Image: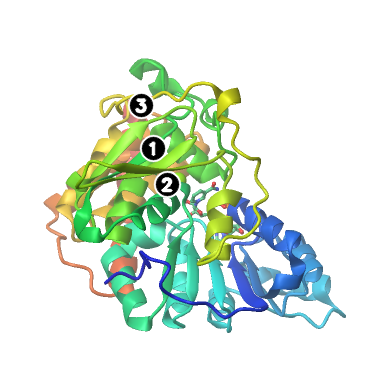
Amino acid sequence: MSAVPLRNDKAVASGVRIVSVLGATGSIGDSTMDLLRAAPERYQVEALTANNNVQGLATLAKEFGARFAAVADESLLGELRDALAGTGIACGAGESAIIEAAERPADWIMAAISGAAGLKPALAAVDRGTTIALANKECLVCAGDFFMARALNAGANILPADSEHNALFQALSSGNRHELTKVIITASGGPFRTWAAADIEQATLAQALKHPNWSMGQKITIDSASMMNKGLEVIEASYLFALSPDEIDVLVHPQSIIHGMVEFSDRSVVAQLGAPDMRIPIAHCLGWPDRIVGRAATLDLAKIGQLTFEAPDFVRFPGLRLAYDALRTGQGATTVYNAANEIAVAAFIAQQIRFGAIARLVEDTLNAWIRAGNLAPLSSADDAIAVDHNARKMAATLLPQIAAKAS
Ligand code: NAD
Ligand code: MG
């Protein structure tokens, strides 16, 4: 049994769907709102949240007639109240207000807050036993076993919104779990796919932010350039579908048309294809178990002409190797991998470290954490949050050393 429904075996209420979007002002939030906007008669928006973009949040709340809007930054409550004055839309600020947004009654919740900050709100949504489109991969990377077990317990449906995992989700319904031999997630290879290691080491922020195919938030775009994003996705796939690291392959596919494939025992490989547009996996989650009318361009393979594939390079992209190592180590190592990466990416954006130092900081933090003997299994969200917190501290302590070596 998994909280990811592998067959279209759960009916949803017909009629108007009550939806909430956690992280409504972000890139995934934007794609989700675009789909909701296309069929306003089908959706009632319950709650919308943002980190600190009050004006963006208020504009969306008014446009969609949301019942509740929450901003994470507590100091912005007054500004949000002013922006919503006279609309009748309730509002709140701070972490508790974000949790309240997740707890409000909704049939479908998009979990699209970025980073480990998304864990508690997503768990609050899970505990309501509702249907959750999960974009926030950090929930799984930081607390995968626990998160999925809690979802199963609460009767929540976890629908993978990340494009590769959504592809696997769609392909998996072609067979049974025991017939699966492996899954393959594709990677564009990012802007540095063909670069020499020495050039990757020196890459600038502007270069890292130039993703060849996808338009996404800043953090995940940098993670795509380092292939840490693919590492996070290997871990994500492992927890979502209860797969061992050996059952998950990564394939570099620069056109980003095939997003994921499942190989079954009879050697059939079932793939999902589509334009690189997050509105496709989000539409699949929003319509599930039915299909809705999408907003992305139709796929014109004749125009694309060629689909090409390469094996990933674990040497030039050590972040990918580290993800497999962390997954094999288990017991919180994937939480450390994510936490150290978040610290490293923030330091790279702040120009404290070079691009190549991102993976070095993650590797050093993982090693320091293993040496310290912190290998206890995670059995609660608080455990995961404590490991996340300690790993961030450890990474921050190691940062000056890494920065000095890289300069
Ligand atoms: P983004 O930075 O564009 O948006 C993040 C959203 O979360 C914003 O609404 C922001 O206001 C909110 N937020 C940020 N920090 C917060 C905090 N501390 N508390 C409350 N709210 C906070 O990010 P994104 O690209 O939309 O990605 C969102 C999540 O989806 C990430 O976990 C990412 O890995 C995942 N994801 C994104 C894509 C993509 O194409 N963008 C694809 C797959 C998965
Ligand atoms: Mg992805």
Furthest residue toward right: 86
- Tell me which label, 3 or 2, sits earlier in the chain: 2
**Mark 2: few, some, or many residues within 10 Å (few <14, many ≥20)?**
many
Q: Which amino acid type is shown beneath numbered disc 1? A: Thr
Looking at the image, is mark 3 or mark 1 earlier in the sequence? 1
Q: Which residue is mark 3?
A: 406
Q: Are marks 3 and 1 in contact (CB under 8 Å)?
A: no
Determine the image quadrant of residue 361: top left
Q: Is label 2 in a helix, a strand or a loop?
A: helix
37 shown above or below 46:
above
Q: Quadrant of residue 173?
A: bottom left
Q: Give coordinates of residue 15: x percent, y percent.
A: 66, 79
Check whether the beta carbons of the residues at disc 2 and disc 1 lie within 8 A of each other. Answer: yes
Q: In whole angstroms, how far apart are the C-alphas of marks 3 and 2?
A: 33 Å
| Residue on which disc 2 sits | 164
Asked if residue 238 shows in the view, the reply is yes
Residue at (66%, 58%) from the top-left corner?
Answer: 25
Residue under pointer 1: 186
Could you tell me which secondary element the residue under label 3 belongs to? helix
Q: Is mark 3 within 8 Å of ligand 1?
A: no
- Looking at the picture, how far across and down is residue 401, in whole percent? 30, 36
Q: Could you say where residue 353 lies in the image, as x and y percent from the top left?
A: 42, 33
